[in-house]
Amino acid sequence: MLALGTLYLTNTIVTLVAIFIAPTVIACVRKHKNAIPIALVNIFFGLTFIGYSFALIWSFTSNCKPGNKVQDWKIITAFIGALAFLAISSVLFFWYFVNQTEQKNIIEIKEYRSLK
């Protein structure tokens, strides 16, 4: 049970960090001319909804160095897919963890009632 809880906690932390740095990763992959300012806004103001939204929208603007746009979108799509996988797996771990805890509590209650 402890290993499952540790795995859930690790998965949740990785998911939250990946979501937090998403604007910076997107700006760097797209070779945005303002990638460093986007990263700074993301780091210092990313914990607020307005700062995160601003950095995310700014990372998708068309102020990019010339490059292969198709390749950029493939990488961004893969990154968003990985984020979705992490988020879904985190929810599934949480559901399984809660379900196992409830079953353990039910067994303990039955054992306690049988002792009376």
Image (tube, helix red, strand yellow):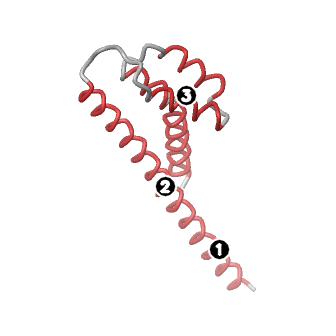
What is the quadrant of the N terminus in the image? bottom right
Residue at horizontal 48 percent and vertical 32 percent from the top: 22
In the structure shown, which secondary structural element does the residue marked by tag 3 occupy? helix
Q: On the rendered structure, is 47 left or right of 103?
A: right
In the structure shown, which secondary structural element does the residue marked by tag 2 occupy? helix
Q: Which residue is mark 2?
A: 93
Q: Quadrant of residue 53?
A: top right
Against 114, residue 33 (above or below) is above
**Which label was assigned to residue 55?**
3
Against 96, residue 72 (above or below) is above
**Which label was assigned to residue 33?**
none
Against 109, residue 70 (above or below) is above
Give 92 or 25, whichever is nearer the viewer: 25
- Work out how far the residue at label 2 is from the one at label 1, CA to CA, in angstroms: 22 Å
Q: On the rendered structure, is 105 left or right of 20?
A: right
Residue at horizontal 56 percent and vertical 72 percent from the top: 103
Q: Do callouts 3 and 2 mark residues in contact (Cβ within 8 Å)?
A: no
Name the kind of residue labelled 3 in the image. Answer: Ala
Q: Counting residues from the N terminus, which is met first, the one under dot 2 or under dot 1? A: 2
Residue at horizontal 51 percent and vertical 37 percent from the top: 19
Which residue reaches farthest front? 62
